[in-house]
Amino acid sequence: MLHLAMEAEEVLGRIGELPGRCKSLKYFGERLLAFSRGELPETTQKRLGTMCVQVPEEILHALGATPVRLCDGSYAYDRVGAEFMPAKSCPLTRATMGKLHINQEFWSDKLDGIVIPTTCDQKRKMAENLATMGYPVINLEMPATRDTELAVAYWQESMKRLAVQIQDITGTKLTRRNLKRAIAASGLSSQLFRKLQRFQQLERPRLYGVDMFLVMSCYFIDEQASWQEAVRTLLAECEEYPADRQVGQPNSPRVLFTGSPAIFPNLKTPLLIEESGGIIVGDESCSSSRILYDAVAYDEDQLYDMLPAVADRYLKPCTCPCFTPNDNRSRKIAELLETCRADGLVYKTLSGCLPYELEQRTVSESLPGDRGPLLFVETDYSPEDVGQLATRVEAFLESIQNRRRKRN
Ligand code: SF4
Ligand code: SF4
């Protein structure tokens, strides 16, 4: 785990040099660093690995399981995975496989199961490979579409099956009471996240986009109540932030970020944007804003109503390109460009991530004409393309500035 910790330290060091950051962000960096060294929060509960934001945390918490996200962003583990995974596989799956392969003794000891939704081909094959390696994999079956009655029924059934499988692991039954409590706790996290997001979207933002990625990366590996407490402290600091100051510069280009998940410590593209003078004022990404944007809404606090409501929260608003059709993603991006008052969109795909690459064209064609340019980047976890990427990002930010000058 030494290499992962070194990568984490390097990225946190660079983030720490961005001017004007809130001091209480330190907590999130420290937690992520500790995780990269193999220090997991203490728990007496069963621990379940997760591999996608589609895993319903409310059900895991209700059944007395602690979720920990295993998706990995480290180049060191990517290289380990590359030894036995196809060269065209995405770095996220390669790094995750590499981590679970090289540290198998550690993770087998820590985990009581790994929940993997059947989203893209690579996730599905990863599940198969991990099961062959001896990990206790639970496939969470997902429909390929969201919009039909059949898909909704299939997903609800899948969720019930998941609950039964986890019940068998933890020995706790799903009840009205424990599910209600878990929904409330996740709802609170969602409220806190939305408050933070307001400080990111201000005319004078008080949080960088990479700060939001840090906070949200931490959400997956931290104990929920500790994370909430740390976010409250951060919110208090944001409240007191001097009104005449901001992160970045007053004329910094405002960027919306979308694309394949940016998994810590691989924050290469978002970090280059902000090191080059831009500010990420919002994102459409399942490694930040999509995680807690939507909360569960139910009418009656009975299991027959709450369980479908949990299923809905994961299916209906999800904009993952693994679903088809996926028009609501383009709509969401257009909406975010407006609400965040963004000057342009950066669309990143990881090499080998076809779902995001395939949607790039649809998204770019649907962008409102007055909402600035789009930069499409394809990258991986290696540091080799940083120079070339930085040049493209700088040119993109410059084009935004030129556009502004022409308008004024
Ligand atoms: S991109 Fe889709 S499959 Fe991948 S983690 Fe996000 S929601 Fe899950
Ligand atoms: S959605 Fe893309 S990044 Fe995520 S596992 Fe699939 S191919 Fe990899």
Image (cartoon, rainbow, N blue to C red):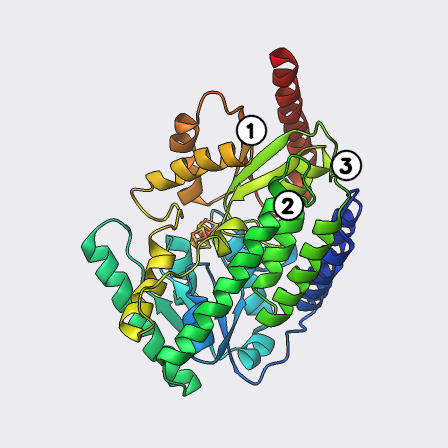
Q: Quadrant of the C terminus?
A: top right
Q: From the image, state whether disc 2 or disc 3 is nearer to you.
A: 3
Q: Which residue is mark 1?
A: 344
Residue type at tag 2: Phe
Q: Earlier in the sequence, mark 1 or mark 3?
A: 3
Question: x%, y% of residue 338?
Answer: 50, 32
Residue 388 position by quadrant: top right
Can residue 135 be seen at all in this image of the molecule?
A: no
Q: Which residue is mark 2?
A: 199
Dot 3 crowding, Cα within 10 Å, few <14, some 14–19, many 20+: few
Q: Quadrant of the N terminus?
A: bottom right
Name the residue furthest bottom. Answer: 171
Dot 1 crowding, Cα within 10 Å, few <14, some 14–19, many 20+: many
Lateral position of residue 259 relative to residue 249, left or right: left
Q: Which residue is mark 3?
A: 244
Q: Residue at x 53, y 83 (%)?
A: 45
Question: x%, y% of residue 327?
Answer: 33, 38
Residue type at tag 1: Gly
